[in-house]
Image (cartoon, helix red, strand yellow):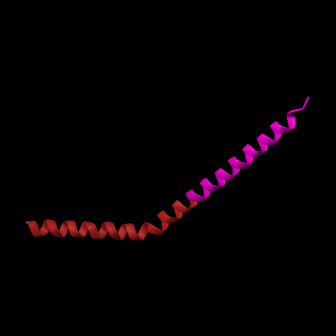
Amino acid sequence: MKLFAFRSQQTRRIVKDSIRMYFAPVIGAFKGIRAELKKADRNVQHHRSAEAKLKKDRHIVPE
């Protein structure tokens, strides 16, 4: 009975590792896309805040 349990665990581990290796490129691609989108969002936010500051500075009229 113990031998069967050992084989079952070993088989589960092999299947789990195989699935993990099969989907690794897809998971890596999703992580890369997510990182690129975050970088793009930071750049957009930076440019928006710079434009808002520039507009604010233009509206200040010295007395």
Tell me if residue 57 comes above or below residue 63 in the rendering.
Answer: below
The residues colored magenta run 34-63
Helix, strand or loop: magenta stretch: helix
Can you say which quadrant of the picture contains the C terminus?
top right
Residue 15: image x %, image y %?
Answer: 30, 69
Q: Is residue 20 toward the left or the right of residue 48 in the image?
A: left
Question: Does the segment drawn in magenta span residue 45?
Answer: yes
Q: How many marks?
A: 0
Q: Residue furthest left?
A: 1
- The residue at 81%/36% (across/down) is 56
Q: Quadrant of residue 5?
A: bottom left
Residue 26: image x %, image y %?
Answer: 49, 66
Q: Is residue 55 toward the left or the right of residue 11 in the image?
A: right
| In-front residue for pair 59/30 | 59
Q: Residue furthest right?
A: 63
- The residue at 61%/59% (across/down) is 36
Q: Residue furthest front?
A: 63
Q: Is residue 30 toward the left or the right of residue 45 in the image?
A: left
Residue 52: image x %, image y %?
Answer: 77, 40
Question: Does the segment drawn in magenta span residue 26?
Answer: no
Tell me if residue 55 comes above or below residue 39 in the rendering.
Answer: above
| In-front residue for pair 25/47 | 47
Q: Quadrant of residue 37?
A: bottom right
